[in-house]
Image (cartoon, coloured by chain):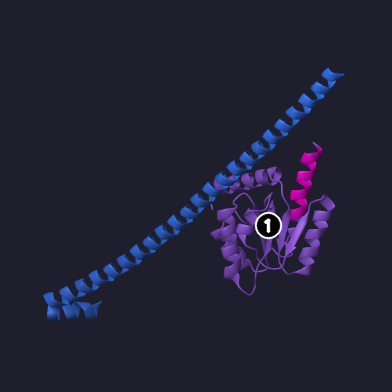
Amino acid sequence: MEEIVMLLEKYGAWALVVFLSFGVCRLLKEGRTILKEKDDMIEHMSKEQRTEIVAVVRECTAILTTVSDFLDRYERYFEQRTIEMEIERRQRDNE
Amino acid sequence: MNRDISRFLSIGRRFRFHQLKGDFLFIGKDPDLKETIEYCMDKFGYTLKSYTCPVSTISLSFLNPIPKCIILEEDHEDLSRTERFLASVDMRIPKTIAILITNDISVAKRFRETFPRLTVVLKGCGFHDLLMTILSKKRERKRE
């Protein structure tokens, strides 16, 4: 501390300017680091969210396709059953 | 991952497992693993097709019905091939359930993050239990 006071006494305003500049540079450097960390965090979060959104959309597609397959199967079964019932009815009528 | 999304994916996977018709597909070289899977499939009356290397997903999509579940063993020689195959399955045949088996925890973590819909199982840690749980649930539903 004493050394700083001696420097200020000796060099006056110039020393003050040097100290302030040093402080400002340090603050700027810290600020940049924090900004970079923030940007990285935002990028990571957006990437994660994008992956999640894609996964949810794909899951919805998969569920809808599965339901569609089920309905197709059911429709085929229903048609088959209708034909069988019609054949049975005709056989009964003929008898 | 968000808990709600994880739950949604898990319920969706269960729904697909119960509704889909099709065979199980095992892609891997480990004979012990193959034996375990074959044992489970035999026990519950499912059919299993085995391959020793990843097959083309285009050819899989032409199968009728398409495979219900693909059980894939991690390719130790070329991990990118496993990744490409899983990405292709995820994109081309999303309704098929994909299970990756690995013995490397970091690989399991990486794949879980890249493919949230994928079920990742560590080799020797509950794969048999997982299969038995899924299959027995299916059997109970059939009985009902």
Chain corresponding to purple in the figure: B
Q: Is residue B40 above or below residue A68?
A: below
Residue that extends furthest to the front in the rendered view of this protein:
A94
Residue B101 percent location from the top left of the image: 68, 63
- The 10 Å Cα crowd at callout 1, few under 14, some 14 to 19, many 20 or more, is many
Which is nearer the eye, A17 or B121?
B121
Question: Residue type at mark 1?
Answer: Ile
Report whether residue B103 is seen. yes
Query: Does the magenta run of residues contain A79?
Result: no
Report whether residue B112 is seen. no
Residue B95 percent location from the top left of the image: 62, 49
Colour used to depict chain A in the structure image: blue
Chain that bears disc 1: B
Residue under the point 79% across and 26% down: A87
Residue under the point 76% across and 45% down: B137
Q: Is residue A52 left or right of residue B72?
A: left
Q: Is residue A52 left or right of residue B70?
A: left
Which is nearer the eye, A62 or B63?
B63
State which quadrant residue A8 falls in.
Answer: bottom left
Circle 1 residue: B70
Which SS type dominates the magenta stretch? helix
Q: Is residue A66 above or below residue B73?
A: above
Residue A70 percent location from the top left of the image: 66, 39
Residue B120 percent location from the top left of the image: 65, 59
Q: Is residue B39 above or below residue A30?
A: above
Q: Secondary structure at mark 1?
A: strand
Q: Is residue B42 left or right of residue A31?
A: right
What residue range appears in magenta? Answer: B130-143
Query: Does the magenta run of residues contain B131?
Result: yes
